[in-house]
Image: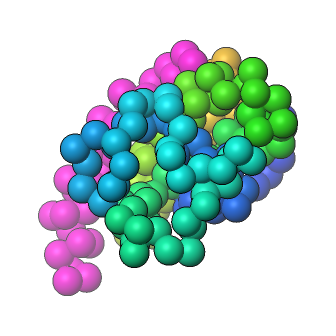
Amino acid sequence: MGVAEMGRPIETRADCGRCAALCCIAYPSDDMPGFSACKQAGEPCQKLAADGLCTIYEDRAEQGFAGCIRYECFGAGQHVVETLFGGTDWRDEPGLLTPMVETFLAMRPVSDLLFLARRAQTLGAGERAGPVIAHLESIAASRESLKEADGLAACERQLKTIYASLRQGSLTENM
């Protein structure tokens, strides 16, 4: 059962303690500022221990990993682990690593758009943002619906229209 189906909204802020270091594996770090180690996409960061926990979490900036601190998955990581994989992760079942990373990469744009839709709601576009939020939460409800991601581009277009109208109205009033 997806988070939205249980009556709780999908979170749009990262909680690394409830994730499985998916961002530390999914993304490459070659030539990226804020990452002092080079790695390929799908390869674990050199600073992950065998148990999948960061060995420098408290000292990331000092160790040359300020990019890790600035990174925001908008809740995609914990949603993948807790909802889409039911709390089981690759650290206990190594065979889940590839499907979890693939699901995380599919969830990221949904989480990004969900964050923007919720932000539009707070800026006075609640009535227009509500259907976008509902559709994004339905996409994120299961691994199958996430793979299809029907309507993701339409949600993005709707949000662009909403934000364009906010810039002309409520955003300029709040500056």
Relative height, residue 139 to residue 115 (above, below): above
Relative height, residue 31 to residue 58 (above, below): above
Decide if residue 75 is on the left or right side of residue 122.
Answer: right
Could you tell me residue 108's position as x and y percent?
48, 40
Could you tell me residue 128's position as x and y percent?
43, 50
Could you tell me residue 85's position as x and y percent?
78, 33
What residue range appears in magenta?
A: 146-175
* Closer-to-camera residue (158/38): 38
Instruction: Indicate the quadrant containing the N terminus: top left, top right, bottom left or bottom right.
Output: top right
* Closer-to-camera residue (100/108): 100
Q: Residue, x 55% and y 16% (percent of image)? A: 148
Q: Residue, x 67% and y 18% (percent of image)? A: 144
Q: Residue, x 52% and y 22% (percent of image)? A: 149
Magenta-drawn stretch contains 165: yes
Decide if residue 135 is on the left or right side of residue 126.
Answer: right
Looking at the image, can residue 44 be seen?
yes
Looking at the image, can residue 117 be seen?
no
Q: Residue, x 57% and y 18% (percent of image)? A: 147
Decide if residue 71 is on the left or right side of residue 102.
Answer: left
Magenta-drawn stretch contains 78: no
Instruction: Indicate the quadrant containing the C terminus: top left, top right, bottom left or bottom right.
Output: bottom left
Mark count: 0
Could you tell me residue 100's position as x and y percent?
65, 30
User: For residue 93, what is the image quadrant?
Assistant: top right
User: For residue 65, what is the image quadrant?
Assistant: bottom left
Here the colouring is: rainbow
* Closer-to-camera residue (152/71): 71
* Closer-to-camera residue (77/35): 35
Q: Main secondary structure of the magenta part?
A: helix
